[in-house]
Amino acid sequence: MTQRVTFQLQARDGKARRGVIQTPRGEIRTPAFMPVGTAATVKAMLPESVRATGADVLLGNTYHLMLRPTAERIAALGGLHKFMNWERPILTDSGGFQVMSLAELRKLTEKGVTFRSHVDGARHELTPERSMEIQALLGSDIVMSFDECTPYPATEEVAASSMRLSMRWAQRSRDAFGDRPGHALFGIQQGSTFRELREESAQALQQIGFDGYAVGGLAVGEGQEAMFDVLDYAPDMLPEDKPRYLMGVGKPDDIVGAVARGIDMMDCVLPSRSGRTGQVFTHRGVVNIKNARHRDDPRPLDESCTCPACRSYSRAYLHHVFRAGEMISGMLLTWHNLHYYQVLMDGMREAIEAGDFAGFERDFHARRAEGDIEPI
Ligand SMILES: [Zn+2]
């Protein structure tokens, strides 16, 4: 087992890449989908169940954990891996995005952001230095540099000054992170939908030097078409030999389209959140389990799926427990959705190795176009 975080590209098909990130806590096969464990748990799932779906790595949220139970408390209890019983790699975000979307009375300056907690109203400050400190206390394997996620839409002037602030914060993040063998620091490209700004940001980040690079500031309401427009050029500006991470994406077709454009890692709350609201992802598109059409249906959600929800339960049962508000509903549907996402990643990895990613994409879209199985 390696003592450093490294990345090897193993195969390429068009822009799609198959690789592996080696960490002291195990390897991450890419393209990788990272389930989100916001508050030191992937909601409704045991960690061993998350692993059983095929996930190599989880995402933890700095903002939530710094407020409750606090990074210092988690460190005193042996770090986030031990605290939440997940031994494999963890990537933590910097807290910047969630401060701007969740906290109250935010004030942004050159130094950082001050805000009031949405939990108890207490005042906090988050700076590049404090974000690095918190992520070190948590014991995160892949640390994200502290940035400002440029709101969308933004004028070119606003996007430029926001991106340049993030690049100054990226340098401060790098300085504060220091040399921590076995842990990686990723920089985050900004620049909204402006190609020149994306290029300037990519250059600034490479001058600083990071172990991986994220494409930031997308999946913030711009829509799939605008996101793909940026992904048609933005990943190409980042180093070939380092992992590329698209933050907060997405729906299954967003993920396939991002991998086709050279993205290696993604995270999203969608499969777990949807599991709790009755929305299910299958090879044939989205199924809404609360619909009355499932009430008498003895068939599984997805015939081809090997997850516990599909192996052992009918649509009728899943419909019933959802309507009855039973906890097993969120458990089974979340398991299925996370399993579906990992099967999707597996399929893409195999297709890239086989040099048939285009065939995979055609098949993926054709099966979804069929729609759900006919009602009985
Ligand atoms: Zn299933």
Image (cartoon, rainbow, N blue to C red):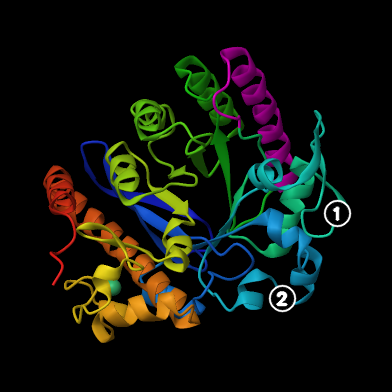
**What secondary structure prevails in the magenta region?**
helix
Name the residue at the front extreme. 292
From what the image shows, is residue 244 above or below residue 181?
Answer: above
CA–CA distance in space, label 1 to label 2: 27 Å
Going by the image, does 107 lie left or right of 232?
right
Q: Amino acid at mark 2?
A: Gly
Residue carrying label 1: 121
Q: Which mark is residue 2?
A: none
Q: Nearer the viewer, residue 324 or 67?
A: 324
Q: Amino acid at mark 1?
A: Gly
> Where are the magenta residues, as a range?
150-178
Q: Nearer the viewer, residue 298 or 120?
A: 298
Q: Residues within 10 Å of mark 1 (few under 14, many from 20)?
A: few
Name the residue at the bottom extreme. 312
Q: Residues within 10 Å of mark 2 (few under 14, many from 20)?
A: few
Residue 293 seen in render? yes
User: Where ligand 1 lies, by image quadrant?
Assistant: bottom left
* Residue at image coords 69%, 71%: 79
Residue carrying label 2: 78
Mark 2: which secondary structure? loop
Residue 15 lies in magenta, yes or no?
A: no
